[in-house]
């Protein structure tokens, strides 16, 4: 074989080596991307109840924030001291003031129905027919009633709930709004779907 043929073969070998390596690298990446993506929870898994984190650091006093968990709206309200103090005065007008018949984690079996009284966390679904109650936090709101103490109002059928999600008497809703399992993480993070029972 001539020296010229050896040079051509050497150049061809080098080209084939580089081309094969490049194709192999692209194939490895193409295989790794879907493999690594499969480790993340799917939208279906999240909808079925995977925990959801919410940053509540910018939530102001008196504001309501909505977060989606299990396909439902979760209401997070940062209550003022005045809102919390008002909870005791509603008891006589409530159907289940001690939340004995309602759905909530053990840590929420208190007057504030919360892990930390400042933050109210509720499933935003009326216990009557599944409508979405509105946050009507201002006492005496004319769209609800002159003697309205503040809370949640369902305009569909007139159900009313106080600032702890407890249902008033003589309305269609039979139960208090549900408190989902939740906990607090670092850096003002609310973790919905995982209850630790510790503040």
Image (cartoon, rainbow, N blue to C red):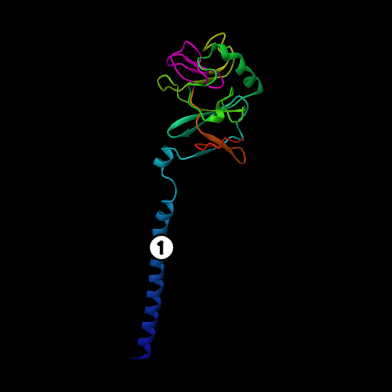
Q: Quadrant of residue 4?
A: bottom left
Q: Residues within 10 Å of mark 1 (few under 14, many from 20)?
A: few
Q: Residue furthest right?
A: 81
Above or below for 170 versus 100: above
Q: Quadrant of residue 7?
A: bottom left
Q: Main secondary structure of the magenta part?
A: loop
Q: Residue at x 66, y 23 (%)?
A: 81
Q: Residue furthest left?
A: 1
Q: Residue furthest bottom?
A: 2
Left or right side of 125 for 162: right
Would residue 68 be counted in the magenta stretch?
A: no
* Quadrant assignment for the C terminus: top right
Q: Position of residue 66 (x, y in %)?
A: 51, 30
Q: Is residue 47 visible?
A: yes
Give the residues drawn in magenta, as a range: 152-176
Q: Residue at x 41, y 70 (%)?
A: 21
Residue to which mark 1 is pinned: 28
Q: Position of residue 56 (x, y in %)?
A: 59, 34
Viewer-side residue, 10 vs 112: 112
Q: Quadrant of residue 61?
A: top right
* Quadrant assignment for the N terminus: bottom left
Q: Position of residue 23 (x, y in %)?
A: 38, 66
Q: Is residue 123 visible?
A: no
Q: Residue at x 42, y 65 (%)?
A: 25
Number of on-image labels? 1
Q: Position of residue 153 (x, y in %)?
A: 50, 17
Would residue 168 be counted in the magenta stretch?
A: yes
Secondary structure found at label 1: helix
Above or below for 175 versus 75: above
């Amino acid at each position: 074989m001539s020296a010229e043929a050896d040079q051509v073969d050497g150049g061809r070998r080098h080209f084939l080596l580089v081309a094969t390596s490049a194709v192999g690298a692209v194939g490895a990446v193409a295989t790794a991307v879907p493999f690594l993506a499969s480790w993340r929870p799917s939208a279906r898994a999240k909808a079925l109840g995977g925990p959801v984190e919410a940053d509540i650091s910018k939530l102001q006093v008196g504001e309501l924030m909505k977060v989606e968990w299990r396909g439902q709206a979760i209401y997070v309200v940062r209550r003022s001291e005045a809102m919390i103090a008002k909870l005791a005065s509603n008891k006589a007008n409530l159907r289940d003031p001690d939340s004995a018949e309602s759905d909530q984690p053990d840590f929420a079996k208190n007057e504030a129905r919360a892990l930390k009284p400042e933050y109210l966390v509720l499933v935003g679904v009326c216990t009557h027919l599944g409508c979405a109650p509105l946050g009507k936090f201002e006492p005496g709101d004319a769209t609800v009633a002159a003697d309205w103490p503040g809370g949640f109002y369902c305009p569909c059928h007139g159900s009313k709930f106080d600032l702890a999600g407890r249902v008033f008497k003589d309305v269609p809703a039979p139960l208090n709004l549900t408190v989902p399992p939740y906990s607090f993480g670092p850096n003002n993070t609310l973790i919905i779907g995982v209850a630790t029972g510790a503040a």
